[in-house]
Amino acid sequence: MALDSTFVQAAIPRFDGHYDHWSMLMENFLRSKEYWPIVEDGINTPAEGETLTNAQKAELEAKTLKDLKAKNYLFQAIDRPILETILCKETSKDIWDSMKKKYQGTARVKRAQLQALRRDFVTLQMKEGESVMSYCARTMEISNKMRFHGEKMNDAIIVEKILCSLTPKYDYVVCSIEESKDIDELSLDELQKEEVEVEVEVEVEVEEEEEEEREETVETEMEAKILVSMMTTAKAEEIILTNQRLPNEKDEMSNFVKSKETKTLLMATQAHEEPLQDAFVLKLVLVIALLWMQWER
């Protein structure tokens, strides 16, 4: 019975213009295929007229075959317009050296890039609403670039940077870590684990508070609707009683009742339409309005 293979061929790193990153990936890829010595050292071709033994011929043929395979990977990794600018493509070493000369930055350019990265690292701060994982990823991205450009940076510096630049809501976490852990010995993985656990706890607390606020708002809205309904009913009864009074009394009280009616309904309407930001004040206004109407009756 044939065995199902789950092996997946490693993807060839494509050159995207960022030479330093691509060269690191491509070198690792060629090393995994055992072709890097050929790319790095090239093939020592025999001098003209030199006679090779059978063993030397076999070794040369084996190296030539490996060089052809390494060239094939480089051809797949580099786009045609860039390959056309490489004049010498006889060996994989020729292609590699040409790419290095064309795209690897000079010492001056590297120093400028490192200075820019240092500024970014110093001014880096966690944004409001940003997750701990996202901020740690941003910090690691800059620190890895600095290391790649020659900066000597250990994990303790990165840990201290992260702890010093978190948002204020994580202050108690920072204090707890500094008191219970040795910062010089704390790894980045341990730091992220601690902060992620705290972040989950904070999110749960925030969700619970938001849920309580929503329940309180719904309850306040229901109470407001009931009070407004009671006020409307009381006002309707007041109008009926007013119409049943004697004509003279009705004429004398007409202006007074209309004025009071307008004020009361206006207060009730405004209290109902205002945003329910302060439930206590809203309830107080509605109760006073209801008592006022009952007193008028």
Image: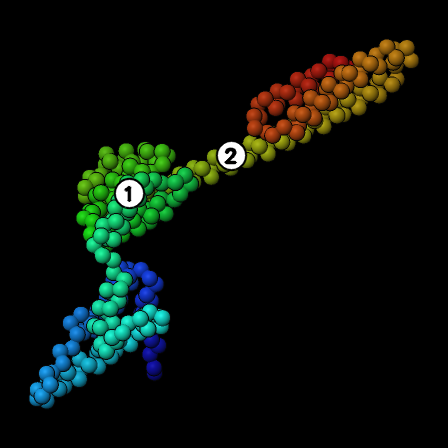
* Residue 189 can be seen in this image: no
Q: Which residue is mark 2?
A: 212
Q: Quarter-wise, where is residue 21 in the image? A: bottom left
* Residue 268 can be seen in this image: yes
Q: Residues within 10 Å of mark 2 (few under 14, many from 20)?
A: few
Name the disc covering residue 231, or none.
none
Left or right, 52 with reference to 16? left
Q: Position of residue 23 (x, y in %)?
A: 26, 63
Quadrant in which the N terminus appears: bottom left
Q: CA distance from mark 2 to mark 1?
A: 44 Å
Q: Nearer the viewer, residue 113 or 200?
A: 113
Which residue is located at x 18 percent, y 70 percent?
Answer: 40
Q: Which residue is mark 1?
A: 119
Mark 2, mark 1: which one is toward the viewer?
1
Task: Name the residue type under label 2.
Answer: Glu
Q: Position of residue 228 (x, y in %)?
A: 70, 26
Quadrant in which the C terminus appears: top right
Q: Are marks 2 and 1 in contact (CB under 8 Å)?
A: no
Secondary element at image label 2:
helix
Please say if 187 is above or below 38. above
Q: Residues within 10 Å of mark 1 (few under 14, many from 20)?
A: few
Q: Position of residue 126 (x, y in %)?
A: 36, 40
Left or right, 120 with reference to 53? right
Which residue is located at x 69 percent, y 16 percent?
Answer: 291
Which residue is located at x 33 percent, y 62 percent?
Answer: 17
Q: Position of residue 71 (x, y in %)?
A: 26, 76
Secondary element at image label 1:
helix
Task: Name the residue type under label 1.
Answer: Arg
Q: Earlier in the sequence, mark 2 or mark 1?
A: 1
